[in-house]
Amino acid sequence: MQSMQKGPLDSLEQWDDHIKGRYRADRKKEEFRVYDESTPPVVREFYRQNHAYQTYDFACAKLAEYVPLRHGRMGIWEAMERLNELVDDSDPDTDLSQIDHNLQTAEAIRAAGHPRWFQLTGLIHDLGKVLTFWGEPQWAVVGDTFPTGCAWSDRIVFPEFFAANPDAAKPELQTRMGVYQVGTGLEQVRMSWGHDEYLYHVTKAYLPEPAQYMIRYHSWYSAHRERDYGYLMEPHDESMMEWVRTFNPFDLYSKSDSKPSFTDLRPYYTELINEYFPEKIDW
């Protein structure tokens, strides 16, 4: 596996000045997901690497490596606790740990009165980021996802960084459809490799189909937010993407500097996890 690559900063503390005020209670929606010259250098460097190295062949190889789910057995809470060590370099909106973000998302969904499976999806949606603890660099784990094997949308963040991707020199991969057929359906599309695709395969046997789509495509902003790539979808995919759009505001706008109480919330979510998952699952 590839070793972890650091961003241009020695530590996240070096951009504390940038994130002051990020968690104001009155923060407006347009202040989230700002990807421009004001974006922290560590985030820009993340996407430079991500867009340069996420090729079609790389995505296919990682799927073949991980989807047999032979990297061990682990319970949901064990994975959650491991994520307490991780801060996502691709996210300009939070520097809290992943367990904090997962609980924030689940609690926002719960407060809105959504079903228990929906709450559980919010709790676990980022657990695929345990890939980082198996040696995968962050550019192969987190960040916005996109289809490989076809032309990149200009609605993907920092599209200019794709110029360094080897697939840019392969004409057969730079047409609108690339290796796919119109309406082929998303099951046939090879997405850039990361925690979304991985966790989908880890958990799909235990969750309802809308939850599967939420997990698999919640980072595909050029599709569910910008509404691009519809030509790769079949009608069922289009209908399921509405669940992803319902999920997205809870994932994105629940971020704040107020940490949920892990101790207080654990009994509720332990019961919820046990309702859907066995004690340990294959990873």
Image (cartoon, rainbow, N blue to C red):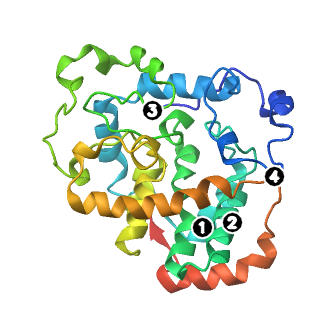
Gap in angstroms between the C-alphas marked 1 and 4: 24 Å
* Image quarter in which the C terminus is found: bottom left
Dot 2 alpha-carbon crowd within 10 angstroms: few under 14, some 14 to 19, many 20 or more: many
- Decide if residue 72 is in sight here: no
- Judge left or right: residue 26 versus residue 281: right
Q: Position of residue 278 (x, y in %)?
A: 48, 80
In the picture of the structure, the residue carrying the numbered disc 1 is 123
* Viewer-nearest residue: 159 or 16: 159
The answer to whether marks 3 and 1 mark residues whose Cβ atoms lie closer than 8 Å is no
* Viewer-nearest residue: 136 or 127: 127
Q: Amino acid at mark 2?
A: Leu
**Tag nearer the camera, 3 or 1:** 3
Q: Earlier in the sequence, mark 3 or mark 1?
A: 1
- Judge left or right: residue 185 versus residue 111: left
In the picture of the structure, the residue carrying the numbered disc 4 is 26
Query: Compared with residue 193, is residue 44 higher up or lower down, i.e. above or below?
Result: above
In the picture of the structure, the residue carrying the numbered disc 2 is 103
**Tag nearer the camera, 4 or 2:** 4
In the picture of the structure, the residue carrying the numbered disc 3 is 156
Report the residue at 50% width, 74% height from top: 280
Q: Secondary structure at mark 1?
A: helix
Report the residue at 71% width, 55% height from top: 84
Q: Amino acid at mark 4?
A: Asp
Gap in angstroms between the C-alphas marked 3 and 1: 26 Å
